[in-house]
Image: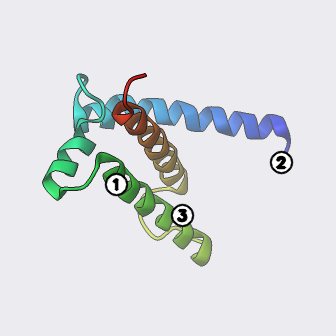
Amino acid sequence: MLRVEIQKLINELSDAESEINMTKGREYAGDEDALANFKQASELLDISPLKVCAVYLYKSLTSLASYARHGHELSDEKIQGRIVDVRLYAAMFLALDRDEAPPF
């Protein structure tokens, strides 16, 4: 695949991420604190918000691993959607880390 084609794919994923962040993200956490759903789950489960996010990320990664093992999709969700989920959870992980970091 040409470098320009990969860049086009990266841009498509980024656009999809932004759309999901503004739709599902609002649905899960509202606009005040985009990380609220991770924080609420962390209180319920008595683990850190980072661990909650890591579990969600792990779930998405295991789905990709299953796809790679079996060579086909095992659910209704397309593989691109799973990749977008991984990218979003990775971004949320970084946001949570920065949110929890002590100020300098």
Q: Nearer the viewer, mark 1 or mark 3?
A: 1
Q: Judging from the image, what secondary structure is the residue with disc 3 in?
A: helix
Sequence order check, earlier mark of 1 and 3: 1
Q: Judging from the image, what secondary structure is the residue with disc 1 in?
A: helix
User: How busy is the neighbourhood of tag 2: few (under 14 within 10 Å), some, or many (20 plus)?
Assistant: few
Figure check: 60 above or below 27: below
Looking at numbered disc 1 in the image, what kind of residue is underneath it? Lys
Looking at numbered disc 2 in the image, what kind of residue is underneath it? Met
Residue 59 place in picture, x, y as percent: 41, 62
Query: To which residue does mark 3 refer?
Result: 64
Q: Most extreme residue toward the left, as rendered?
A: 44
Looking at numbered disc 3 in the image, what kind of residue is underneath it? Leu
Q: Nearer the viewer, mark 1 or mark 2?
A: 1
Query: To which residue does mark 2 refer?
Result: 1
User: How busy is the neighbourhood of tag 1: few (under 14 within 10 Å), some, or many (20 plus)?
Assistant: some
Figure check: 96 above or below 86: above
Q: Most extreme residue toward the bottom, as rendered?
A: 70
Quarter holding the C terminus? top left
Q: Is residue 7 left or right of residue 69?
A: right
The image quarter in which residue 68 lies: bottom right
Residue 21 place in picture, x, y as percent: 39, 33
Q: Nearer the viewer, residue 33 or 97?
A: 97
Label 1 and label 3: CA atoms lie apart by 20 Å
- Residue at horizontal 23 percent and vertical 34 percent from the top: 29
Query: To which residue does mark 1 refer?
Result: 51
Q: Judging from the image, what secondary structure is the residue with disc 2 in?
A: loop
